[in-house]
């Protein structure tokens, strides 16, 4: 399977926080055979402290009968392997991003994601992926 990825430099904790606040472009993208993942920083509050976690979105792009591009979140048996490939790449990149944050200084009031964040009620975990 061929991987297409936009090369990005490892962001600092400050850059990730700024991007999370500005809701800009994804930190990275991976695609394979029309299926794509994008990695997004999300800022959450835990115990009155701001934390940044990373999430991946998954979608399929296709052209409809009129030739217009559409998005879908439904995958055929053959597309599932491409989705898995993209999600594995996204997972690896999220681990790399978390490790990069762990090794960079976070701005005041921000706790890096590598601290095993768990948000009760919505199943969010930043490290360990339980």
Image (tube, rainbow, N blue to C red):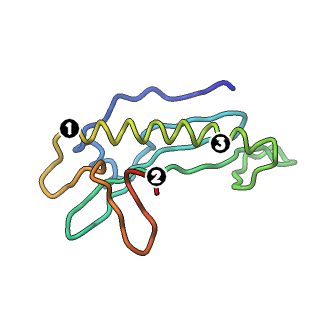
Would you say 14 lies left or right of 3 here?
A: left
Tell whether label 1 touches label 2 (CB within 8 Å): no
| Residue density around tag 2, few if under 14, some if 14–19, many if 20 or more, within 10 Å | some
| Residue density around tag 1, few if under 14, some if 14–19, many if 20 or more, within 10 Å | some
Q: Residue 47 has which mark?
A: none
Q: Earlier in the sequence, mark 1 or mark 3?
A: 3
Residue 114, compared with residue 33, is above or below; it is below
Give SS at disc 2. Answer: strand
**Of all residues shown, which one is farthest toward the right?**
65
Tell whether label 3 touches label 1 (CB within 8 Å): no
Q: What residue is pinned by disc 1? A: 104
Q: Earlier in the sequence, mark 2 or mark 1?
A: 2
Q: Earlier in the sequence, mark 3 or mark 2?
A: 2
Residue 76: % across, % down: 81, 49
Is 37 in front, or is 94? 94
- Residue at left offset 72%, top offset 50%: 70
- Residue at left offset 25%, top offset 38%: 12
The residues bearing labels 1 and 3 have C-alpha atoms spaced at a distance of 30 Å
Would you say 64 lies left or right of 69 here?
A: right
Q: What residue is pinned by disc 2? A: 55
Give SS at disc 3. Answer: helix
Residue 48, quarter of picture: bottom left
Would you say 118 lies left or right of 89 here?
A: left
Residue 34, quarter of picture: top right
Residue 108: % across, % down: 12, 54
Q: What residue is pinned by disc 3? A: 84
| Residue density around tag 3, few if under 14, some if 14–19, many if 20 or more, within 10 Å | some
Residue 56: % across, % down: 51, 49
Residue 4: % across, % down: 59, 27
Q: Which of the two marks, 3 or 2, is nearer to us in this view? A: 3
Residue 113, compared with residue 9, is above or below; it is below
């Amino acid at each position: 399977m061929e991987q297409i990825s936009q090369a990005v430099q490892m962001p600092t904790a400050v850059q990730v926080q700024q991007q999370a606040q500005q809701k800009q472009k994804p930190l990275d993208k991976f695609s394979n055979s029309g299926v794509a993942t994008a990695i997004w920083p999300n800022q959450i509050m835990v115990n009155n402290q701001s934390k940044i976690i990373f999430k991946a979105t998954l979608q399929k792009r296709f052209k409809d009968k009129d030739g217009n591009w559409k998005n879908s979140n439904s995958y055929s048996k053959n597309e599932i392997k491409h989705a898995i490939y993209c999600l594995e790449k996204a997972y690896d990149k999220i681990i790399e991003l978390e490790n990069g944050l762990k090794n960079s200084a976070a701005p005041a009031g921000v706790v890096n994601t590598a601290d095993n964040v768990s948000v009760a009620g919505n199943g969010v975990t930043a490290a360990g992926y339980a």
